[in-house]
Image (cartoon, rainbow, N blue to C red):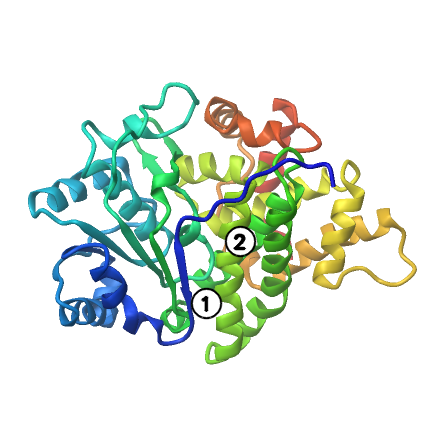
């Protein structure tokens, strides 16, 4: 093996049904004044109150911030950080999905560093202000099975004034404790379950096909994420009370977060962030439109890798050539999107030429690196064509 790579994981991963009960013991090792970040829905369901009770029983003072909206903005991060700072909070607890965890990560930085959080966002490379000091420690308890944000070192933030979504990236953003309790995903609606699960699947696919950054560690987690999502996401959608499937899907999401941390996401994610910023399209839904069209232009350039993915999802039949297996994977993912109901959720605007041109411009303005790490390396006109295909009205 000739590859050169380094693997580092600074956080602790706690996994299992009922593990939310340990959040107080984990948090009190890190601080005494907790800033609990969540959303109104989880407050109304009683999950936030349950977490608050466990934290307070362990001896922590708790300030609850439950005003997180989908796709957190940089302004929302700054406002939440000001609240945490004024109350002298010394540990941040994130209870929620990717948006909650991303806002909480932003708070860990913004509460300890000067200036607006957007100054620290890496969207064109060298212009980002460096994170130089200690950030607040984070405990992340995901309530969705998809983003893997509990084990990544990044947070995606929205800047509405610029029409841009981009990543805050730094090793200090790793959660000190990732507490994955599959029971917390039981309240998710089917559509959100499907979208977040497809996000986890895409993390595995893109990491595996990222030719510049893939390594044995990322490949291991990528294939685990892909295999589990392919089997267990349909099971969860068919029977929301299938506890085994929920546990497997939660672990798939964590594996997806691990593999993109060890390598990187690639073209579909590079296209999905501008699409979400411009149209407000939920991330997993955007990926369900983009990933199939990207793979349709990928398999001939990476036939062996795509053939391996076909084997991972059970789409490779005996006697198939490498090329036939690779193409079978493209066909499988198209049918999988339909199987999990995401085709029916699409309400996009259609393939408007001006919009597709703007989205393409956005990709190369601040998401060019993942495009360059892929094979084939798509030219701008190819990215624009793929946007047009993805935005076309859904078929049967």
Give the image location of residue 156, x and y in percent. 38, 40
Q: Secondary structure at mark 1?
A: helix
**Which residue occupies 60% across, 48% down?**
218
Q: Is residue 335 visible?
A: yes
Give the quadrant of residue 384: top right
Which mark is on residue 190?
Answer: 1
From the viewer's side, name the closer residue of 59 and 126: 59
Give the image location of residue 60, x and y in percent. 13, 63
Kindly give the residue lying farthest to the top in the view shown.
127
Give the quadrant of residue 97: bottom left
Which mark is on residue 256?
Answer: 2
Which corner quadrant holds the C terminus?
bottom right
Q: Is residue 353 visible?
A: no
**Which residue occupies 88% across, 63% down?**
318
From the viewer's side, name the closer residue of 356 and 158: 158
From the viewer's side, name the closer residue of 152 and 159: 152
Q: In this picture, is 321 found above or below 43?
A: above
Q: Earlier in the sequence, mark 2 or mark 1?
A: 1
> For mark 1, does the 10 Å Cα neighbourhood hold few (<14), some (14 to 19), or many (20 or more) residues?
some
Q: CA distance from mark 2 to mark 1?
A: 20 Å
């Amino acid at each position: 093996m000739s590859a050169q790579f380094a693997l580092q994981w600074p956080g602790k991963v706690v996994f299992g049904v009922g593990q939310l009960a340990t959040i107080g013991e984990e948090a009190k090792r890190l601080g005494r004044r907790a800033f609990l970040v969540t959303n109104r829905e989880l407050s109304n369901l009683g999950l936030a109150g349950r977490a608050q009770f466990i934290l307070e029983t362990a001896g922590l003072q708790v300030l609850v911030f439950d005003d997180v909206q989908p796709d957190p903005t940089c302004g929302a991060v700054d406002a939440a950080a000001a609240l945490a700072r004024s109350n002298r909070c010394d540990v941040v607890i994130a209870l929620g999905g990717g948006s909650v965890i991303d806002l909480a990560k932003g708070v860990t930085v913004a509460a300890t560093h000067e200036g607006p959080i957007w100054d620290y966002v890496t969207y064109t490379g060298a212009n980002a202000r460096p994170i130089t000091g200690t950030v607040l420690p984070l405990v992340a308890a995901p309530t969705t099975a998809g983003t893997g944000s509990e084990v990544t070192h990044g947070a995606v933030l929205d800047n509405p004034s610029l029409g841009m979504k981009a990543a805050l990236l730094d090793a200090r953003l790793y959660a000190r404790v990732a507490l994955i309790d599959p029971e917390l995903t039981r309240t998710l609606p089917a559509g959100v379950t499907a979208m977040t699960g497809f996000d986890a699947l895409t993390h595995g696919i893109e990491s595996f096909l990222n030719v510049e950054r893939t390594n044995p560690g990322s490949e291991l987690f990528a294939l685990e994420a892909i295999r589990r999502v392919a089997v267990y996401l349909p099971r969860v959608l068919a029977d929301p009370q299938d506890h085994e499937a929920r546990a497997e899907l939660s672990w798939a999401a964590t594996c997806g977060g691990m593999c993109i941390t060890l390598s990187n996401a690639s073209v579909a994610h590079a296209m999905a962030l501008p699409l979400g910023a411009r149209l407000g399209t939920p991330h997993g839904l955007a990926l369900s439109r983009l990933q199939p069209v990207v793979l349709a232009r990928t398999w001939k350039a990476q036939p062996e890798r795509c053939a391996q993915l076909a084997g991972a999802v059970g789409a490779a039949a005996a006697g198939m050539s490498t090329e036939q297996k690779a193409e079978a994977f493209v066909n499988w993912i198209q049918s999988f999107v339909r199987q999990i109901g995401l085709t029916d959720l699409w309400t996009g605007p259609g393939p408007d030429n001006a919009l597709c041109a703007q989205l393409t411009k956005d990709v190369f303005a601040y998401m060019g690196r993942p495009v360059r790490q892929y094979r084939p390396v798509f030219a701008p006109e190819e990215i624009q064509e793929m946007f047009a295909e993805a935005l076309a009205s859904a078929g049967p």
